[in-house]
Amino acid sequence: MTTIQWFPGHMAKAKREVQEKLKLIDVAFELLDARVPMSSRNPMIDDILGQKPRLILLNKADMADEAVTEQWIRYFRDQGRTAIAIDAQSGTGVRQIAAVAKEMVKEKFDKMRAKGIKNPRPVRALIVGIPNVGKSTLINRLAGRHIAKTGDKPGVTKAQQWIKVGKEMELLDTPGILWPKFEDEDVGFKLAVTGAIKDEILNLQDVAVYALRFLSVHYPERLSERYRLDNIPADIVALFDAIGRRRGCLTAGGGIDYDKVADIVLYDIRTEKLGRLSFETPAAWT
Ligand SMILES: Nc1nc2c(ncn2[C@@H]2O[C@H](COP(=O)(O)OP(=O)(O)OP(=O)(O)O)[C@@H](O)[C@H]2O)c(=O)[nH]1
């Protein structure tokens, strides 16, 4: 497993690498995490992709709140962009990608035909996204076989060739890896909550505090149900205590083991024990 350290030099290199690849392709697939579409977005993406046709793929939609994902699709549509929800792991939504991509580059290909090219080449595409957003999983899914290395931990993508996706599309087998806006603390927490950045990077209790505050406001009924709480204490320590007591997270001295509570809450979020959750809504971005 490689660990990506994002320093200014690395970011400049990553940008250059993506821009080199852009010369080879017709359409870019911007892969985002449907649960946190803004936090999983590269802050310079418009600058990096320029005028290249772009299809936004809201991945891991199986874990996101469906209603919120619909809002995001509308949000992007209002900005003149096309977004679709997919689940690269199970393949839901993946089959429509080639058709939508083809439609997006129709003008360019019509021009080729007008110049007398009868059978233009397949539409060429590149996947770009931050670490752990599902690039390798999607490449494998589109290829219909195992090509790219995937992993639970961030930073595992390797190897470059065209992969055939049906007759009409081909994909570069090495995705463009870009960085998130990690200087923003909120972004860091959201990426940590959804498991996109490694648990060693931020303090787990801090991440759990962030998650519980969010859930208390946006999904209180899920917390009540999961941890059998009659009411959700407004005080965060009281909430940790309540969950800790329910789950028997006690220290040797009989106090609450806050690390254990944090572990349980984050595990429950990441394994959908609290249901499908979205941690960002478009309302904050309009
Ligand atoms: N539930 C769910 N999990 C997914 C989906 N897509 C990918 N995953 C999981 O997310 C994790 C990361 O996926 P990868 O395909 O390795 O991500 P990547 O973007 O290639 O990661 P790097 O190699 O770090 O750049 C893996 O555990 C996948 O199984 C999805 O649509 N739904």
Image (spheres, rainbow, N blue to C red):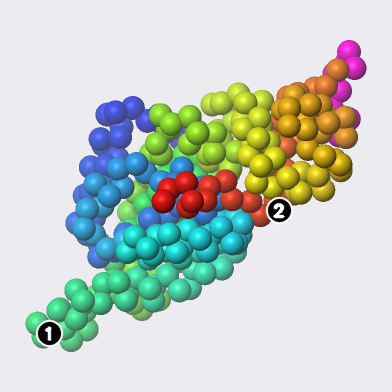
> Dot 2, how many residues are within 10 Å of its Cα: few (below 14), some (14-19), or many (20+)?
some
Q: Earlier in the sequence, mark 2 or mark 1?
A: 1
Q: Based on the displayed image, in which of its 4 quarters is residue 160 positioned? A: bottom left
**Looking at the image, which residue sits at the far top?**
253
Q: Is residue 210 visible?
A: yes
Q: Main secondary structure of the magenta part?
A: loop
Please identify, in this view, whether the residue under mark 2 or under mark 1 is nearer the observer.
2
Q: Amino acid at mark 2?
A: Gly
Which residue is pictured at 52% across the width and 69% down the height? Answer: 93
Which mark, residue 275?
2
Q: Is 71 drawn above or below residue 253 in the view shown?
A: below
Residue 269: give x, y in percent of width and height: 68, 44
Mark 1 residue element? helix
Give the magenta part as a residue range.
247-254
Residue 181: give x, y in percent of width and height: 40, 36
In the drawing, does residue 239 fall left or right of residue 211? right
Which residue is pictured at 79% across the width and 26% down the height? Answer: 238
> Dot 1, how many residues are within 10 Å of its Cα: few (below 14), some (14-19), or many (20+)?
few
Give the residue number, with chain letter if any, for mark 1: 114
Q: Is 12 drawn above or below residue 164 in the view shown?
A: above
Which residue is pictured at 72% across the width and 28% down the height? Answer: 236
Residue 72: give x, y in percent of width and height: 48, 58
Label 1 residue near ligand 1, CB within 8 Å: no
Which residue is pictured at 39% across the width and 76% down the height? Answer: 99
Mark 2 residue element? loop
Query: Could you say which is closer to the camera, residue 128 or residue 64?
Result: 64
Q: Amino acid at mark 1?
A: Ala
In the drawing, does residue 48 fall left or right of residue 227? left
Q: Based on the displayed image, in which of its 4 quarters is residue 189 positioned? A: top right
Q: Is residue 271 magenta?
A: no
**Looking at the image, which residue sits at the far left?**
115
